[in-house]
Image (cartoon, rainbow, N blue to C red):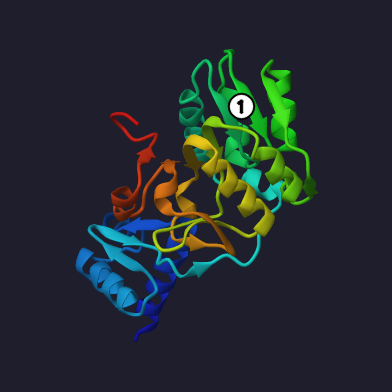
Amino acid sequence: MSMLTQQRHEEILRQLQEKGSVSVMELTEQLNASESTIRRDLLALDRMGKLHRVHGGATQTERQFLFNEDNIEEKVRKNMEQKRLIAEYAASQIQPGDFVFLDAGTTTLLMIDYLKPMDVTFVTNGIMHGRELVLRGFQTNLLGGELKAATEAIVGLAAAQNLSHYNFSKAFLGTNGISSKFGYSTPDTDEAFLKSAAIDRSFVSYVVADSSKFGKVSNVTFGALNSSAIITESCPDPRYMEETVVTVVGEKGGN
C-alpha cells in the first residue's frame, strides 16, 4: 500500500470519527482524488471492518466503544450548532398540559431556551435544568438522590424510586451512544437505570442526540432502539429509520 493511500485512509477514518458519516462527493473534493479512487478506498476500509459503506458514502461501524464520559463543561462545547437545532425542534413538541420528564444533559438543557410560557409541569434530574425551568416560571419537580459530579445529574436508587410515582406524557433523554444492535447506552449504571425507568413511565419518549452519537456503544444499555423516537440533525445510515421514528431537523425543505 502506498503512503498516499495510507494517508487517504487515515483522513477518511478521522473524518468519520469526527462527523459520524462521510460522502464520496465531499471526500473527492477534500482529498483531491477521483470518485473511483475514493470508492475503492471505502470498499477496502469496509472489508477491513473499519467503516460501513452505504450508498454515496460511508458511516462508522457500530464497534466504536466509549471508554469514558466528558464532564458537563466539555459536553457543552461540543457540536453546539447541531444541538441547538435539535433542542429547538424538541422544545416545539411540548404542548400545554404536558407532564414532562427532562433528562439531565446538554441538549435537554438547551431545550429550555426555546420553551414558550405555557401550562406544563416538568420533572428533571438535572440541577441546572431545574434552576432554569423555575426561573422561566415552570412548575418543576427535582428528583432526590445521589448527585453525579461530572454531569450534575441526580441518579441512584432513591431517584429511580422517586421517578416510579410519576406518569409522563413525554420524556426527553440524552444518550452517549446509538446502535442498532445495542440500542441507547450510557457509561453509568445508575444513570441508565433512571433513563430506562423514564422511558417506561412515559407515553412517548424522545432521544435527543446529534449525529456523532450514531454507531457508538457505551457501558450500559438503557433502551432498545425502538423504545424511543430520535431527534437529530443528521442520520448517517437509513437503517436506523427502519427501526424507529427518526426526525432529522435543519434540512432544507423542512424538518
Tell me if 37 is positioned left or right of 163 in this view: left
254 w.r.t. 238: above or below: above
Residue 88, percent from left and from top: 50, 28
Q: Which residue is mark 1?
A: 112
Residue extending furthest bottom?
A: 1
Foreground residue, 62 or 140? Answer: 140
Residue 92, percent from left and from top: 47, 24
Foreground residue, 33 or 209? Answer: 209
Residue 128, percent from left and from top: 73, 34
Tell me the crowding category of disc 1: few under 14, some 14 to 19, or many 20 or more residues within 10 angstroms, Cα based. Answer: some
> For the point 58% across and 13% down, which residue is it?
119
Residue extending furthest top?
A: 118
Residue 185, percent from left and from top: 54, 57
Residue extending furthest left?
A: 36
Amino acid type for the residue under numbered disc 1:
Ile
**Residue 33, image quadrant:** bottom left
Q: Quadrant of the N terminus?
A: bottom left
Residue 204 seen from this side: yes
> For the point 55% across and 31% down, which residue is it?
168
**Residue 171, image quadrant:** top right
Image label count: 1
> For the point 20% across and 68% down, which residue is it?
36
Residue 78 seen from this side: no
Q: Assign a secondary structure to mark 1.
A: helix
Q: Quadrant of the C terminus?
A: top left
Foreground residue, 104 or 41? Answer: 104
